[in-house]
Structures are given as C-alpha cells and as structure tokens.
Image (cartoon, rainbow, N blue to C red):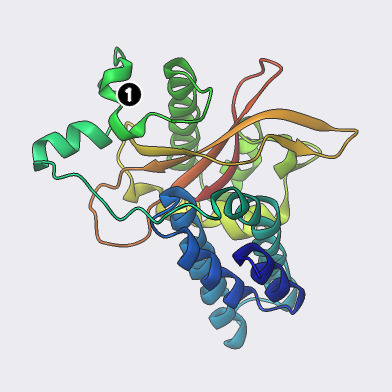
C-alpha cells in the first residue's frame, strides 16, 4: 500500500493525527514547503484538541478545524505525495558560509525592488510560472494586509480585510466565520513577530490549480510564502498562501498561518 493510500485509509477512520504523521514522515527531505505546512496543521490540531478538552472552544470550532485539516490532506497533500512517490529523500545541503546563505535564501523586496533572477537563489520557484513581478505583487498584497492588522482593532480590521482575500474565504462581502476564528484572529495577535517591510524567506508552489466549484471556478496558481521573523525564536514560521488567477486578475490571499 502506498503512503497516499495509507493516509486515505487513516482519514476514512477519522484518525487525522496519524494521517498527518504519515505525511510529515514522507515529506521530510522531499518537499520542505509542504512538510512545514503539515507541521503547522498538526500543531494547530493539537492546540485545538487541548483547548477543546479544557472547554475553551466549542465542538463546532473543533469540528471545523478537523474539516479544514482533512480538506488540506485530501486536496493538496495526498496529490503531492502521489507525484513524489518513488523519489529518493534528499538530505544533502550544500555547505554555504553564513553571509552567502543569507544572500541566497532571503529576498526583501522592500529593500531590493530591482532584484534579478540571480538574487533569488532557492527562493526562485522551480516549477511555477510565477515571475519576479508576480512575487512583488504578492509581497505588496501581504504588506498591505499586515498594515491593516497594525492600523485597526481586530473586528474593524476583519470588516475591512475582504479586499485582500480570495472570494473562497468570503460570505458575500464579509469574511467567513471559520477563517476569522481560526486564522484571522491569530494573525492579528501575532503579526508583530514578522519584519516590516515584509520579507519573504522562501516560496513554494502548491499543487492547487483551481479554486471553487464548476460553476464558480478560478484557475491559476497558488504559492506559499514564508515570512521572515523579527526574532527567530525557533517556533513555526509564518506563511501566507497567495493565489494568482489565470484570468489576469490581481493575486488574493487564500490562507494565513501566523
């Protein structure tokens, strides 16, 4: 049985924790971006399990969290694992002096708007069509989103945030309650942990090429951006998912994990 089939079986049994453990074990050394994302899902699931046991959150919130993790596993993680199945784990990391490492993996558009492809190093997507101009649009989008968090109290900021979000995160013109509860509130609490102007440490394309139903479908490309912290305290990195629609519309945020 393949790893993907094992994960499907665990999901069918309702064991999301074991499903994530299988995914994390497989993705380590194969897909750093998705490996990190699965670690975040596991941390959030464990945190919400603890809060539920302490009666801090309701059963509805717990069910919503589990549904979101299940959706991520089925829609993104399993598909990626199937494409990687059979590839060797890569634990090799070239020896790089600290100064060179910083230049290679970090790109701060706020101070380096004239960057060329040579400056990207490992930040440059290898199998994505995203250009330097697209990355700058994404950085500006996230920058404006963080400015909103810094300017307004949380409920006022939530009311104004629709312009930055993909419509899949909206109900009419307002933010979906589950995204607001599970992601936005936390982002509003933790945005000060990240450098401003916003600096992307790395990017990772996902396998997502469309969002929505057949009647309301956006085709395009989704990129996960990891943000640089003000102080690296060893915690989980903050990430923002940005979707670039094929129709030429501007990029929109599809997930925030601070």
Which residue is depicted at the point 54% across and 70% down? 22
Q: Residues within 10 Å of mark 1 (few under 14, many from 20)?
A: some
**From the viewer's perspective, is 173 left or right of 72?**
right
Which residue is depicted at the point 47% across and 29% down? 144
Quadrant for residue 55, please give it. bottom right
Question: Picture coordinates of residue 70 (x, y %)?
Answer: 69, 64
Quadrant for residue 140, please give it. top left
Q: Going by the picture, which residue comes out furthest to the bottom?
A: 53
Q: Looking at this view, is 147 or 27 the one in front?
A: 27
Question: Picture coordinates of residue 227 (x, y %)?
Answer: 37, 42
Q: Is residue 23 above or below residue 37?
A: below
Q: Is residue 106 above or below residue 84?
A: above
Q: Looking at this view, is 20 or 232 the one in front?
A: 20
Q: Going by the picture, which residue comes out furthest to the top?
A: 114
> Quarter holding the N terminus?
bottom right
**From the viewer's perspective, is 204 left or right of 20?**
left
Which residue is depicted at the point 76% across and 74% down? 12
In the picture of the structure, the residue carrying the numbered disc 1 is 109
| Residue 126 visible, this orientation | yes
Question: Picture coordinates of residue 166 (x, y %)?
Answer: 67, 35
Q: Is residue 97 above or below residue 52?
A: above
| Residue 198 visible, this orientation | no
Question: Picture coordinates of residue 187 (x, y %)?
Answer: 49, 51
Q: Is residue 199 above or below residue 250?
A: below
**From the viewer's perspective, is 192 left or right of 145?**
left
Count of residue discs: 1
Which residue is depicted at the point 69% across and 66% down? 5
**From the viewer's perspective, is 31 left or right of 122?**
right
Q: Secondary structure at mark 1?
A: loop
């Amino acid at each position: 049985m393949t790893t993907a089939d094992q994960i499907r079986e665990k999901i069918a049994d309702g064991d999301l924790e074991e499903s994530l453990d299988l995914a994390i074990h497989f993705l380590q050394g194969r897909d750093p971006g998705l490996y990190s994302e699965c670690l975040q899902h596991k941390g959030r699931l464990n945190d919400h399990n603890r809060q539920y046991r302490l009666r801090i959150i309701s059963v509805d919130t717990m069910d919503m969290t589990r549904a979101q993790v299940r959706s991520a596993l089925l829609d993104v993680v399993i598909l990626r694992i199937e494409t990687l199945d059979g590839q060797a784990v890569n634990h090799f990391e070239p020896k790089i002096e600290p100064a060179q490492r910083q230049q290679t993996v970090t790109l701060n558009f706020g101070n380096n708007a004239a960057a060329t492809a040579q400056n990207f190093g490992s930040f440059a997507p290898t199998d994505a069509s995203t250009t330097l101009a697209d990355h700058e649009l994404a950085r500006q989008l996230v920058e404006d989103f963080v400015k909103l968090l810094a300017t307004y109290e949380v409920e006022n900021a939530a009311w104004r945030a629709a312009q930055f979000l993909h419509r899949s995160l909206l109900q009419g013109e307002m933010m979906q309650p589950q995204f607001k509860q599970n992601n936005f509130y936390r982002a509003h609490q933790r945005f000060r942990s990240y450098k401003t102007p916003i600096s992307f440490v790395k990017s990772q394309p996902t396998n997502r090429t469309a969002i929505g139903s057949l009647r309301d479908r956006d085709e395009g490309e989704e990129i996960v951006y990891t943000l640089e912290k003000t102080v690296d305290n060893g915690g989980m990195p903050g990430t923002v998912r940005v979707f670039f629609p094929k129709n030429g519309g501007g990029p929109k945020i599809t997930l925030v994990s601070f």
